[in-house]
Image (spheres, rainbow, N blue to C red):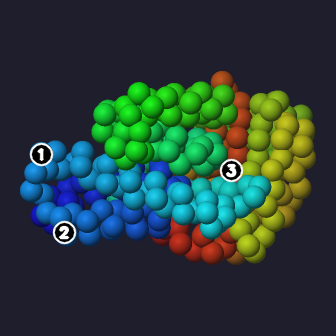
Amino acid sequence: MAERFEAHRGHLRAVAYRMLGSVSEADDAVQEAWLRLSRNGTEGVGNLGGWLTTVVGRVCLDMLRSRRLRREEPLDVHVPDPIVTAPDGAAADPEARALLADSVGLALLVVLETLAPAERLAFVLHDLFAVPFEEIAPVVGRSPSAARQLASRARRRVRGAAPVPDPDPARQRDVVDAFLAAARGGDLDALVAVLDPDVVLRADGGAHGPVRLVRGATAVASGAVVAARHADGGRPTLVNGAPGLVGLVEGRPVSVMAFTVTAGRITAIDVLTDPDRLRRLDLTFLAL
């Protein structure tokens, strides 16, 4: 039974991560699924992968509802846990590769966190993992038709708020490199040229630092120039499969930046500076 479960672990972590936006909570959800399987066994389970997926979905749904009741969500800005890998992806371990399969960017995860728990579950399971509504319905306690409506409502909100990244990773990296060069050179005009007019920057310092939401190309460009003056440098990375940067001070990671590039311009920048959460990230590839 343990071997069969391990064969599905990567997929289950990916489901839970998209549901919760937290790697540690995703691991907790997967562990709870294992406990339920070990208690109940596989008798009467025809499709173990499908059964485990819906179990993880139900666990995540409970966690999301409990999170809301305890008001754990920040009131203004929250950047989900990033999955950070080397620029070529070569240093990604098997678990990171599983999380990044059909990778979902931080900008989309931010939008998913604005959905009601049942909407998020219906959207994630159906749209991202092709789970039929007949299997989603019992998890949310509704009919298949009502589950379909939940996913449809979530889909409309996602389409209206989450930018769709350009498909060419090399082109994305070129745009991000141009942004970084312009910021270091203090070239406001060049910065504005690579930023979408409605670009959004979200910065999450947690309980120990500033939490900011900045909108508009001019405001984001001005802030980037100021930040570049105080930065020692950084290492190019992939963040959730898209171009990113790990900011360093005396060799110590102090920030992770994720960029969303749409139609050749940066539409979203998500920055994590929370030292507690940064310490939990696997950034060992930086020493390579």
Q: Nearer the viewer, residue 246 or 146?
A: 146
Disc 3 secondary structure class? strand
**Going from the N terminus, do you reach mark 2 or mark 3 first?**
2
Q: Quadrant of residue 229?
A: bottom right
Judged by depth in the image, the label closer to the viewer, 3 or 1, is: 1
**Image point (40%, 68%), residue name:** 28
Q: Where does residue 236 sit, x and y in percent of width and height?
A: 60, 53
In which quadrant of the rendered image does the N terminus lie?
Answer: bottom left
Q: CA distance from mark 3 to mark 1?
A: 42 Å
Q: Nearer the viewer, residue 244 or 62?
A: 62
**Image point (80%, 32%), residue name:** 198
Locate residue 275 relative to residue 7 in the image: left or right.
right
Locate residue 266 relative to residue 32 in the image: left or right.
right
- Can you identify the residue that label 1 sits on? 46
Q: CA distance from mark 2 to mark 3?
A: 39 Å
**Is residue 88 something that shows in the picture?**
no
- Can you identify the residue that label 2 sits on? 38
Locate residue 216 relative to residue 239 in the image: left or right.
right
The amino acid type, in three-letter code, at marker 2 is Ser
The mark found on residue 270 in the picture is 3
Q: Eyeballing the image, is 275 above or below 81?
A: below
